[in-house]
Image (cartoon, grey):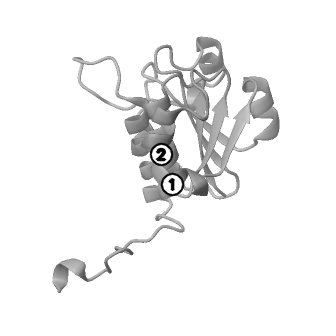
Amino acid sequence: MANHIVLYNPAIPQNAGNIMRTCVATNTTLHMIKPLGFDLDDKKMKRAGLDYVKDLEMYVYENWEEFKQKNKGYYYFTTRYSKKTYCDFDMKKTDQDHYFIFGHEHDGIPKDVLKEHLEECMRIPMSTKTRSLNVSNCVALVIYEALRQQDFPGLSLVETQKGENFLYE
């Protein structure tokens, strides 16, 4: 079982770069479904992803149909229109891969796709003063909830750069 982040028609290179860094930090594969609102060589995206991009496992698809055909598992759709929160889902299942799908920054995931998967739609609770959160923040919230439920498989639970006792020395 593995976790995957799916960006459905991402538009903003800085968001994609931040998400790339999160994917590397969480051992998560990134999938992007065209059209992309930027060139993958965009300087802003590369700057946001820093030097971590070399460690990223990433795939790009021509459309939603190609993505579905090539990727089987549990699909979760993040949308502000869902009636269930991301914490309402059991993400511990280990028999198949988990795909967390996030939409275009301005339009989200197309309504016809969401309507086909109403039981797999999730939202992030927020005040009524905003429409939505930044997509890179949403990705981080959702993937870390999944990883928490899965006991953070393959991730270090201690500081590896300066040592786990850095604060205690």
Residue 96: which disc?
none
Q: Position of residue 154 (x, y in %)?
A: 54, 68
> What separation in Å lies between label 1 and label 2 (alpha carbons)?
6 Å
Residue that carries the numbered disc 1 in the rendered image: 52
Give the left or right position of residue 97, taking residue 129 as reference: right
Please, is residue 76 above or below residue 145 in the view? above
Q: Residue at x 82, y 34 (%)?
A: 69
The number of discs equals 2
Give the left or right position of residue 80, taking residue 53 as reference: left
Displayed quadrant of residue 159 = bottom left
Q: Residue at x 70, y 41 (%)?
A: 59
Q: Residue at x 58, y 13 (%)?
A: 111
- Res 88 visible: no
Q: Amino acid at mark 2?
A: Gly
* 130, 52: nearer the viewer: 52
Q: Position of residue 53 (x, y in %)?
A: 55, 50
Q: Bin the neighbour count of mark 1 within 10 Å (Cα to Cα): few under 14, some 14-19, many 20 and up.
A: some
* 99, 6: nearer the viewer: 6
Quadrant in the picture for the N terminus: bottom right
Q: Amino acid at mark 1?
A: Tyr
Q: Bin the neighbour count of mark 2 within 10 Å (Cα to Cα): few under 14, some 14-19, many 20 and up.
A: many
Q: Are marks 1 and 2 in contact (CB under 8 Å)?
A: yes
Q: Secondary structure at mark 2?
A: helix
Q: Position of residue 110 (x, y in %)?
A: 60, 15
* 20, 81: nearer the viewer: 20
Residue that carries the numbered disc 2 in the rendered image: 49
Please, is residue 67 above or below residue 146 in the view? above
Q: Position of residue 73 (x, y in %)?
A: 71, 44
Q: Which residue occupies the extreme front position in the image? A: 43
Q: Secondary structure at mark 1?
A: helix
- Res 141 visible: yes
